[in-house]
Image (spheres, helix red, strand yellow):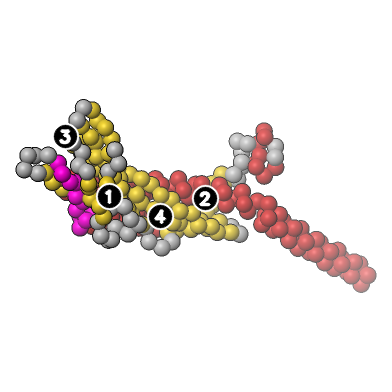
Amino acid sequence: MKGKKRNFKMIIFIYVIMFIFMSVLLLIYLNYFLRPTLIAYCDQEARITAAETINNTVKFEFANKISYDDIMTVKTDKDGNIVMIQANTVELNVIGSQIALEVQKRIADIKEKTVEIPLAVLTGIEILSNYGPKIPFKMRPIGSVLTSYRSEFISAGINQTRHIVYLDVSATVQVIVPLARNSVTVTSSIPIAESIIVGKVPETYAEIKTENVSKDVKKYNIKK
């Protein structure tokens, strides 16, 4: 009777050891072979989500609050010719700060996301490419959201030029998945105001093109 108990305990012990061994092998496999694929898929989904958050924040929260005349001042000479276009740095700084804070808040409010990894990636069997597990992951902002501005001049017809002001918003988010985490930076360029300049384009204009919107405005020559 005692011999049977010992054999039973030995069998249980062997099964436990085998289970631990197989678990370790599975973790090694997941860590070295599946983790890069998992991170790649989650990073891509995080980029899409962050870009949508940035674009929707500017589109729905600030689109009707920004006008060209509020952020740009057109200066003319005594003959009415445009001699300079100057940026309203105070207003641009306010807008940039408000958008950065709102984007950061919205990213922080994002609930847990999921990404579906095709079984074909895991098994190499193409017939399973439309099926796969849904892996949950979390994303949160890292550091501050950065905003900067830039201008673009496009010919709009005879003696007409379209001046477009773009807002570049850059956000870094941390992607947290089982067994790993990674950071991705997403930058979206959004046109926030534009105007048609009738007449000769001025030789100089004032433009903000820095990573910190609080920096002083700088003058750049327009290359024709």
- The amino acid marked with disc number 4 is Ala
Camera-side mark, 2 or 3: 3
Q: Quadrant of the C terminus?
A: top left
Q: Quadrant of the N terminus?
A: bottom right
x, y percent for residue 127: 67, 33
Camera-side mark, 4 or 2: 4
Q: Earlier in the sequence, mark 4 or mark 2?
A: 2
Question: Would you say 74 lies left or right of 148 here?
Answer: left
Bounds of the magenta span?
A: 82-92
- Residue that numbered label 4 is attached to: 171
* 194 or 79: nearer the viewer: 79
- The amino acid marked with disc number 3 is Gly
* 86 or 54: nearer the viewer: 86
x, y percent for residue 221: 27, 47
The answer to which image quadrant residue 124 occupies is: top right
Q: Report the number of discs.
A: 4
* 37 or 188: nearer the viewer: 188
Residue occupying the point 41% across, 47% down: 51
Q: CA gap, disc 2 to disc 3? A: 47 Å
In the rendered structure, are the residues bearing label 3 and label 1 in contact, judged by CB atoms less than 8 Å apart?
no
- The amino acid marked with disc number 2 is Asp
- Residue that numbered label 3 is attached to: 199
- Residue that numbered label 2 is attached to: 43
Q: Earlier in the sequence, mark 1 or mark 2?
A: 2
